[in-house]
Image (spheres, rainbow, N blue to C red):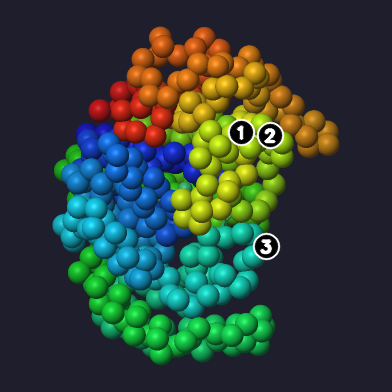
Amino acid sequence: MANYIVLGAQWGDEGKGKIVDLIAGYMDMVVRFQGGANAGHTVIINDDEYVLHLIPGGIVSGKAVNIIGNGCVVDPLIFDKERRYLKDKGIPVAPDKLIVSDQAHIVTPMHRHLDKIMNKKIGTTGRGIGPAYVDKVQRTGIRAGDILNGAYEQIFNEQIRYYQRMSECIFEEPFIDINEIKTQFATAADKIKPFIADTVNVIAEAAVRHQNILYEGAQGTMLDVDHGSYPFVTSSSTTIGGAFTGSGVFMDFDKRIGVVKAYTTRVGEGPFPTELHDTTGEQLRKNGHEFGATTGRPRRCGWLDLKALKRSFINNGFNYISLSKISCLSGFDQVKAAVDYDAAGKPVYETFDGWQQPIEGLKKEEDLPGNARAYIDFIESYLKVPVGMISTGPARDHIIIRDFLW
Ligand code: IMO
Ligand code: MG
């Protein structure tokens, strides 16, 4: 039996999808516990690419039972769309492999509409995440269980009244076509019904049976509503505490895996001390194909920020690092990592000699250029946590494994 959690240690897009897929092949259950369709988890198997937003990454391997926990916000329309997308790619998504918590909150078209008109400053994904969590905390939300017992329609209509006024009177924006959205939503709500259940019991029973359980984080630590760069954050707890409230089950994780990208990226607005506005930043974007999986936006790029990561490691108690996209650093004369900030808040860098050799696809540590190894050694010694896996490319087998998890 093994219980693992995979969390993004930076601002999301660390490469969690690949690691989740790798581990999920050996897992009985994969649990998502926060966020919604704002995630963009890319899994590449042979020549096939799967981009998942809402459904847990364990669905691709086909073995695990996947849970969308109570801490998530679920958009029935996107749920249905993603299910059809997977079906078209030959991956069946049936209730024996995917269960949605009856306590999870529902994202409605009104949430998506408001998100788009009110959160421009933050640069959200526009998926209605913030407004859905607002309704949850405000106690005016719809829960998946309300769809099962039919209670949702009344709340849905109340939301329409409220959001229509918000849209027209406060933001002076035309509202969405209500009749159309009502029918669309009702159809999608009907389709999600067979997937809804009490997931707390399902997870607890799997734990009692000593099954292998993986918790899959979305977004990253620095986007956490409490611990991230507020207000430029997402609206959920992306750190380890979110795993407990968002699943309703305590797990004594054997490995708390922090996924760390070998440099830093961020989509949307907000502080980013090591951001590069020059050709080096452009080169990083090009090497790493840094364009959002959910919105297609170009990601802001910069050097690794170890100082910020230190805090992220305190937040999560990581005891295993999965280092990703090291292959995207080939070709630079120098590679830098921030180890502190000066009095003005500017990063203080440690500079490393770069390496020219391509790393993509390497499977053996001995094959890594010496300078890349020195960079990895430094990361380990600074964060005082071992690097257990080094991802060397997008494919499943582009990986150097030092500490096996299965
Ligand atoms: P994965 O799981 C990167 C960012 C958005 C925005 C802020 C708030 O692929 O790592 P939201 O729509 O959540 O209210 O937007 O958070 N953001 C992400 N950035 N990766 C993600 O997910 C993200 N999910 C949200 O760009 O700045
Ligand atoms: Mg992403």
Q: Residue at x 56, y 53 (%)?
A: 297
Q: Residue 379, relative to residue 247: is it above or below? A: above
Q: Nearer the viewer, mark 1 or mark 3?
A: 1
For the residues bearing labels 1 and 3, Cβ distance under 8 angstroms: no
Residue 164 percent across, percent down from the top left: 55, 86
Residue 6 percent across, percent down from the top left: 40, 39
Marks 1 and 3, how far apart at CA: 27 Å
- Residue count near mark 2 (Cα–Cα under 10 Å), binned few <14, some 14–19, many ≥20: few
Label 2 sits on a secondary structure element that is helix
Residue 186 percent across, percent down from the top left: 31, 81
Q: Residue furthest right?
A: 344
For the residues bearing labels 1 and 2, Cβ distance under 8 angstroms: yes
Q: Which residue is the site of mark 2?
A: 279
- Residue count near mark 3 (Cα–Cα under 10 Å), binned few <14, some 14–19, many ≥20: few
Residue 248 in sight = no
> Three-letter amino acid code at disc 1?
Gln
Query: Residue 121 — which label?
Result: 3
> Three-letter amino acid code at disc 3?
Lys
Q: Quadrant of residue 281?
A: top right
Residue 377 percent across, percent down from the top left: 53, 15
Q: As rendered, which of 149 and 345 lies closer to the eye?
A: 345
For the residues bearing labels 2 and 3, Cβ distance under 8 angstroms: no
Q: Residue at x 56, y 12 (%)?
A: 371
Label 3 sits on a secondary structure element that is loop
Q: Which residue is the site of mark 1?
A: 283
Marks 2 and 3, how far apart at CA: 26 Å
Q: Residue 140, relative to residue 47: is it above or below? A: below
- Residue count near mark 1 (Cα–Cα under 10 Å), binned few <14, some 14–19, many ≥20: some
